[in-house]
Image (tube, rainbow, N blue to C red):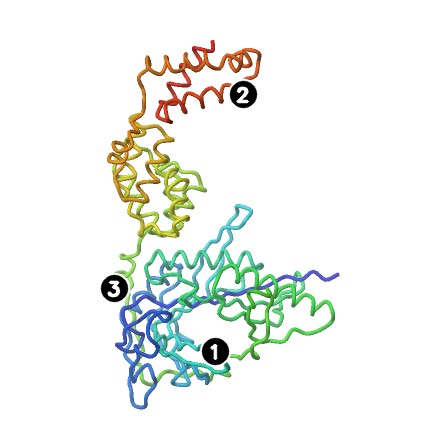
Amino acid sequence: MITYEPIIGLEIHAELMSKSKMFCGCKVVDSVTAPPNTAVCPVCLGMPGMLPVINRQAVEFSIKVAIALNCDVQHHNIFARKNYFYPDLAKAYQVTQYEQPIGLNGWVDIELGTGETKRIRIRRVHMEEDTGKLTHENGRSLVDYNRAGVPLLEIVSEPDIHSGEEARAYGIKIRRILRYLGVNSGDMEKGVLRVEPNISLRPMGSTTFGTRTELKNLNSFRALADGSAYEIMRQETILRAGGAVVQETRGWHDSKRITFSQRVKEEAEDYRYFDEPDLPPLFVDEEWITAVAQTLPELPDAKLARYQIEYDLSPYDAAVLADEIRVATWFETAVTVNSAITPKTIANWVINALFRLMNNAKLTIDEISITPEQLVELLGLIADQTINQNSGRKVLDEMFETGKTAVSIIESKGLTQISDEDALAAIVAQLLADNADSVAAYCGGNKKVRGFLIGQVMRATKGKANPRLVNDLLTKALA
């Protein structure tokens, strides 16, 4: 039986977060919430005689991305017209880059489920403009041109991906880099980041590509992984039955979990590319590239490695904190507040306590009222035994809900930890006397009773007893 090898190349379309559109002065607005067709002008509507002008900020964002993706930034850039008719394309052509894009020959490393890494090559990074947005309802189609002309960056991988899960890992990696650079929000539900895999199968060992299909405008990484997996299975079923795969564009039906045909896939010659006559060549010199490179932040892979070395974090903890740049910035601010509180302690509280509260409230790190300084203040109160860990978690919950400081909550609730050895020794002695049967069971070899007795002490002190001191006193008393 023939074994087939899936071949996947991924196209990622990322809207750039510039203030204005790619070739005109129209403001870039939220295409979901803004009133339709209010951020438009004769240029982005394709009116006759209108001349486009290149957006410098969009070019610099594109250079940033090309550098971060290890591309060769091209000095000589040419914009081209990609001709096709569709209702969301007012001009009946899209201004894009074809033969001379901003970036070539890049790569990123992705992490596989086995713990290994794999290098995915990037063929090209090119600038273009986005199209309008179609809404289909009640048997009619409505078009909103607010999004038409928004700067768009297309990132095209080489066909180095061999499964839906690899495609997901690659997509997540690219999204993380774009968010770190501050050039794209990564909000796939709003369509500002769209992924489109090109999928084909070939016999294992063959170097000839099979007929490919493209899954269009996927808006989640789950859809990317599942849609790719389904399409691989669908194509293999066709080939094993002796059929032929048709080159076409397909969609992903999220509820039915299947792909469906949309239209026959075009070839490059169908678009009749030619140089955009209204735009001059764009020259990007070394001085400009160097200036942009100096604005790049520390990128995710470098931050991940540094967290493990500098902060002694586990690979898992480092990955969780480095995943989102706003979380990483919040964490690093906290680390600088009090050198007596270790980064590992802060990481543990952020990941296990703060994230739980954020998830329950559906808030991001920059939407919460707790500051890095306030969290470290709380951890300092735990470290100097003003309160214990259990009380600390309760205090953090109230800080999150009310915005109050740890000190004010501790004072108002009377949560100061009991560390008076004589007072706790008396409580331990009384509870052992009250629970003679449990003491006898412990002395008879039932060591699990010890946990019950510690719990009784904590209950008697309303959770405020110093746990370490309780443990020591109980050990002595039971001995």
Circle 1 Cα neighbour tier, 10 Å, few/some/many (<14 / 14–19 / ≥20): few
Location of residue 170 with respect to 44 vertically, above or below: above
Residue 276: give x, y in percent of width and height.
Answer: 36, 83
Q: CA distance from mark 2 to mark 3?
A: 71 Å
> In the image, what residue type sits under mark 3?
Glu
Q: Nearer the viewer, residue 53 or 407?
A: 407
Asked if the residues shown at circle 1 and circle 2 are in contact, with their CB atoms under 8 angstroms apart, the answer is no
> In the image, what residue type sits under mark 1?
Glu
Horizontal relation, residue 11 to residue 386: left or right? right
Q: Looking at the image, which residue is at 48% across and 53% down?
A: 110
Task: Give the farthest residue toward the front.
Answer: 434
Q: Give the residue at mark 3.
A: 287
Q: Nearer the viewer, residue 51 or 188?
A: 188
Callout 3: helix, strand or loop? Answer: helix
Q: CA distance from mark 1 to mark 3?
A: 51 Å
Q: Give the residue at mark 1.
A: 137
Q: Give the residue at mark 2.
A: 448
**Who comes first in sequence, dot 1 or dot 2?**
1
> In the image, what residue type sits under mark 2?
Lys
Mark 2 or mark 3, which is nearer to you? 2
Circle 2 Cα neighbour tier, 10 Å, few/some/many (<14 / 14–19 / ≥20): few
